[in-house]
Amino acid sequence: MTQTIAPRVRTLVLLFLAVTGALLAGAAPVSAHAALTGSDPGQGAVVDRAPAQVSLTFSEQIAVSDDAVRVLDPQGKRVDKGDPANPSGTTYTVRLLSGLPDGTYTVAYQVVSADSHPVAGAFTFSIGAPSETSVSVSAQASDAGLVGWLYGLGRYTSYAGFVVMAGGAAFVLACWGRGAGVRPVQRLVVSGWLALTGATLALLLLRGSYTRSGKIGDVFDLSLLGEVLQTKPGAALVSRLLLLAAAALFIAVLFGAYENREDEEKRDLTFGLAIGGTVVAAGLAASWAMSEHASQGLQPGIAMPIDVVHLLAAAAWLGGLTALLVALYRAPADTPVDRDAVQRFSRLAFGSVVTLVVTGVYQSWRQLGSWSAFTDTRYGQLLLVKIGLVVVLVAIASVSRRWTSRLAQAAAPTDTRHEQAQETAPAKAVSAQKSDAGQDVTDAGGRAETAGKAGAGATGAGEAVGADSARAVQLARQRAAMETARQKRLRDADPDRFGLRRSVLAEAGIAVVLLAVTTVLTQTEPGRTEQEAKAASSSSSASASTGQGTGAVTLHMPFDTGGENGKGVATIDLDPARVGDNDLHVYVEGPDGRPVDIPEVKVAFTLSAKDIGPLAVVPDHVTTGHWSASGVQIPMAGDWEVEVTVRTSDIDQVTVSKNAKIG
């Protein structure tokens, strides 16, 4: 237990923990997981008069801060007032100052998506007519600089550390109990724990700057840290740290009390460690599931447990593979990884692969939603790369299984002779060392006696005896080291074991790249979300610009009358949105997206360019939250202003408007 890990093993560990980050640290920033699907005024729109507010609609719920949405005039001065409001679902509004002059205005936003990733962007609209502006519309996200790079590296390291720690411990418990006393394996598992703990602390400190300013100087801002602790990702990181304390206790027992127990006691302790380790590992995996992709979108109640199982299976396979590689290369000659251990890991890896396939199919369906998303979205393209790597890894694993079978089929007499040689050789070496040492001492004594007779003196003889004794001890150590090296060469000369080592090394190399691609996937916008955002954005643009082609215009108008239950969204459908008769439908929903009834709804159409209107329409109430009117006459094509007046009580009323090209 006093030997230290060799440089080659240290290289293997660093390969798994650091190369993952090195492969991807320079990758371009990935798209965020919440996308802007609509706005009012729309991007590039020209409105006749200054709006009272600006609304932004995202593909999922977001977290906003006081400065999350900023509206800047042509000179770059802010013209918004108050904090952003959330009147309905995924729509967020910010009020504007009154009396805004004509010109081009810039809307810049920086928010955090529900699955913890920052989202930034900007667009412009104009009042009256477009004008020159001193504001740049290209908004850089807080995750695009050094802080974003460090945060990404921390994510890669945390995944790799978890895989090494959990998978290495599972390999010892389930496959190779003797590995608990092998120092290189101990160092591997502890390195995984240290990597995961250090990365988690770094992520917690970086989180505030990562989602807000992007400045390295804000990493140690305690106020930002306090805000982070109140968010879901912050709670997940703190939970991970607490579970890592329990993991440290588990590792101490595994490599301490467990190693020193007798075989009978080990079997009893193994069951308890297996249960406790599984609970801790599942909790750590849940700290990712509760704050990332699985927690948002379709079926989160099913997706999060499946995500936990998927991550545990990956750790058992890839982390166990790393532990096996270290054992094959660096286990001491007197404690080689045996054939039974390799066979047990082969079965564990097979079960993990089956689990990964089943859970991966569900995750792919959930995140993509269509076959076209495989090729049309970045998430789908990365997923195809991951699938290809898994196929290659399974193919190499099948080669490893064949080498394992050959090891298991080795002749029993050969094993017996090898074990006897291992037991006899050290004894012979010790005997030879003692004989040589004794002979050297005797010769030294003889020489000392002769020297005494010659008159050299007793002191000189004593010094000669001491020097020869030290030389004998040194010689014995050298011979013992040579014998250990000889046994290791004999062990490694086994062609089946050599073949297994090469195939496992190839597996580990592919596993590094596979883990890297998987880590990038966790930061990439799911294909389903990306396609839905594109569709919604296209639909919104088409609806806001013209009804031609689709034969209808749909306008979403958030409102707030200021009274109790005064918030909601009014949706206007005008079909076919052309000159002549049209059917009008008005739908009113509350903040929770459910239809609600209100005392009064009125609609008016105005064509300012031709001084026509307002043409008032009072639709009839049809059912809860639905009003309609038929035969609505639009006399001329043009850019019409559609006003909706909503009254939610006897005194609470508001009028909201949007422009739409009709005819």
Image: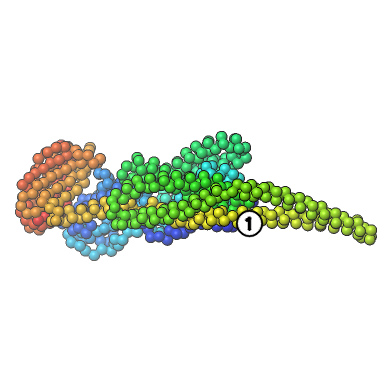
Residue 522 can be seen in this image = yes
Which residue, as the protein is rendered here, is positioned at the far bottom? 132
- Tell me: 420 left or right of 169: right
Image quadrant occupied by the C terminus = bottom left
Residue 308 placement: quadrant = top left
SS state under label 1: helix
- Tell me: 19 left or right of 493: left
498 vs 566, nearest the viewer: 498
Indicate whether 5 appears above or below 89: below
Residue 638 screen position, x and y as percent? 10, 57
Measuring 20% from the left and 44% from the top, which residue is drawn there? Answer: 569
Residue 186 screen position, x and y as percent? 57, 47
Disc 1 marks a residue whose amino acid type is Arg
421 vs 77, nearest the viewer: 421
Residue 349 screen position, x and y as percent? 47, 47
Q: How is the image coloured?
A: rainbow
Residue 243 screen position, x and y as percent? 48, 41
Measuring 11% from the left and 43% from the top, which residue is drawn there? Answer: 628
Residue 169 can be seen in this image = no
85 vs 13, nearest the viewer: 13
Measuring 28% from the left and 51% from the top, which residue is drawn there? Answer: 370
- Tell me: 363 left or right of 542: right
- Tell me: 273 left or right of 67: right
Counting every numbered tag in the picture gives 1
Mark 1: give few (<14), some (14-19) or many (20+) Cα within 10 Å: few
| Residue at image mark 1 | 489
Measuring 62% from the left and 49% from the top, which residue is drawn there? Answer: 414
